[in-house]
Image (cartoon, coloured by chain):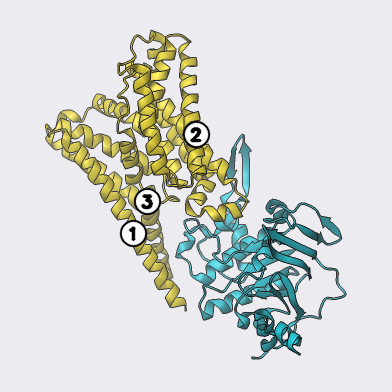
Chain colours: A cyan, B yellow
Amino acid sequence: MPLEPATHDRPASRAALLRCVGVSKFFGGVRALNRVSLDLFPGEIVALVGDNGAGKSTLVKILSGIYRPDEGELWLGSERVEHLTARRARDLGVETVYQHLSLCDNLGAAANVFLGREPVRWRMGPFRVLDEERAIVEARRRIEEVGVALDDLSVPVRRLSGGQRQAIAIARALVSAHRLVMFDEPTAALGVKQTHVTLELIRRVAAQGIAVVLISHNLDDVFAVAQRIVALRLGQVSLDAPLAEVSRATVVAVMTGLAFRERELS
Amino acid sequence: MTGNAGASRGVDRIVRHHGRNLGLALALALALAVLAIFSPKYMTLDNFVVVALQMAFIGIAALGTAHLVIGGNIDLSIGSLFALTAVVSAMLSRVVPPVLAMTLAITLGAMIGWLNGALVWRIKLSPIIITLGSLAILRGVVLLLTGGYSVRGVPREFAAIGQERLLGLPMPVIALGILAVLAQWILVRTTLGRHLFAIGGNRDACEAAGIPVRRLVLGTFFVNGAIVGLSGVLAASRFGSASPSFGVALELDVITAVILGGVAFTGGEGNVLGVMLAVALLGVINSGIVSLGIDPHYAEVVKGAALVVAVTLDQLSLEARERYRKMTAMRER
C-alpha cells in the first residue's frame, strides 16, 4: 500500500484548534469514554478508528455539543468551553457530516446547503422572506469550491449521484465550519469511484486550514488521506501516532485489542 | 444540439413542476365542457358562485391540511373540530358580541389543534390513529353540547358577517382567496415554508441543522386548528345556525382535495394552486352530477376513486423515481 507523502510537517509547533483534556462520559454504570485526551490541529486530517462500541461516536457527539462530558475539559484555542451545545458548536465553527448524509431529498442543492441558515431578504414578524438568488449564487460557489459542478441547483437532490450529494453535504458543513469538520463514515455507502471523489473532497477541506476528523472502518481510506491516527478501544485512546510511523498490522492489532494482550503476555 | 437539450430540459422542468396542475386544469376544463354540452343551465355565473360557496369551507380547511401534510403530519379530527367551532361560536353569539364569539371559537380551534399536535409529537405514533381518536371525541363533545339539536336563534349581526358580499362574492369565498394567496406565499417565499418542506423531506436532517422542528410542527397544528375554526365559524355565520352534523366526513373531502392536488401523503411535496384546482374539480364534479340528473351518490364513488387513483399515481411515480436514482447511481459506479 503506497502511502501518501505527508503534505505538511506534524504541527507540533502550532497551537491546537481544539483540545479534549481527560474527557469521560458515563451511561449509567458504563464508562463510554475514559479520560480521553486529544488535540486537533488546523489542516490536519485525523483518522478516528476503533471497534464498534469503542466510543468513537460518543466522542464525536461530545465535540459537536450533543452530549456533555461528565469529566474533563474542552478547549477551543486558548478559551475553555464550559457548556457546549449543538447550537454553540455550530456557532464556534464545528460541523459534522453524518453517515446518512442528512440531506432533504425533496429539496434542491441550494436549499440543502443553506438548510436552517437560509439567506433572508427581509423579515416581518414570524415571516422571513427567502433570498433565493443569493442562495443559488452562494451555494454554487461553495459547491464548486469542493470541486463539483452542478448545473441546476433547484433539482431535488434525490436525482443526483452519491458523489454530488456528498459534495452538497460537505459544502453545507463548510458554510459555518471554520475550525473542525468531523466525517462519520463518509464512504460507507459509496462505490469505488465515489469514494475516491469523497476522499479528495476531504483533502480539500483540510487544505483550507480546517481540522478534520475522519471516522472510518475502512483502513484503505484512512491510509489514503489521514496524517495522524487515533484509535479508541473500550473508551480509551489506545494509539495516537502519525500514520507514517505505524503499519496496518499495528492499527488492526490496536483496534482489536491484540496489542494489549501481546504486551501483557510478554 | 445543446439548444435542443436545453429546450427539452425546460419542457422536462415544466412537466416536473406543473404536470399535476396541468392535468387537474385539463380535467376541470373537460368536466366543464361536458356540463356545457349536457347541462347548459349549469354554466351561469350565479351557479359558479354557489359552487364556490359550497367549496369554500372545504377549500379553507384544505389550506391548513396541505401545510400539515407537507410537513409530514395530518389531522383527521378537522370534521369534528369544524362542527365544534361552528356550534360554540353560535352558542356564544347569543351571550357575547359576534366578533368576540367568533374570535373565541377560532382560538378554541387553534388550541385543540395544538393539543392534537402535542399528542402526536409526544406519542411518536402515526398521527392518523391519534387524531382519529380526537375525531370521535370532538364529535361526541359537539353532540353533548347541543343535545343533538341545531343551534338556532343567533343574532342578526352574527349571521351578517358570513352573509356579507364583496364584489358579488360571498364572504367565505373571499376568505378562501385571501388565505390561499397567503398560504402560497408562506410555502414558497418564506423560511417557514422552506422548513416545512424540509421537515416533510427529512426530519432528522432538520434537527441536525438546528431548525426548531418541534415548534414548527406544533405551530402548523395550531394554525390548522385556527383555520378549521375560521371555516366552522364562517359556516355557522353564513347559515345563521350550527348543526351538530356539520362537517361530517369533511376530513375525507379535504384530504382527497389535498392529495389529488399533488401534496405527497409522505410529506415534502405540494403547492397551493394544485390543491385549489383539486377543490374546484371536486366541487364541479359534485354539483355537476346533480345538474346532469345522475344519482348524487355517484359523487361519493367518484370522490373516493379520485383519492385512490391519486395515491396510486403518486406511489408509482415515487417508485419510478427511486428506480431512476438507483440506475444513475449504478451508472456512476
Between B107 and A256, the one nearer to me in the picture: A256
Q: What chain is tagged by disc 1?
A: B
Quarter-of-image position of residue B68: top left
Dots 1, 2 in contact, CB < 8 A:
no
**Crowdedness near tag 3: few (<14), some (14–19) or many (≥20) residues, C-alpha within 10 Å:** some
| Residue of label 3 | B18
| In the rendered image, the vertical position of residue B115 relative to residue A75, given as above or below | above
| In the rendered image, the vertical position of residue B167 relative to residue A252, given as above or below | above
Which circle marks residue B115 in the picture?
Answer: 2
| In the rendered image, the vertical position of residue B215 relative to residue A264, given as above or below | above
Amino acid under disc 2: Leu
| Residue of label 1 | B317
Residue drawn at 52 percent across, 43 percent down: B122
Which marked residue is nearer to the observer: mark 1 or mark 2? 2
Amino acid under disc 3: His
Q: Earlier in the sequence, mark 2 or mark 3?
A: 3
Tell me where residue A173 appears, x and y as whole percent: 64, 61
Q: What chain is tagged by disc 3?
A: B
Q: CA distance from mark 1 to mark 3?
A: 15 Å
Residue drawn at 41 percent across, 51 percent down: B266
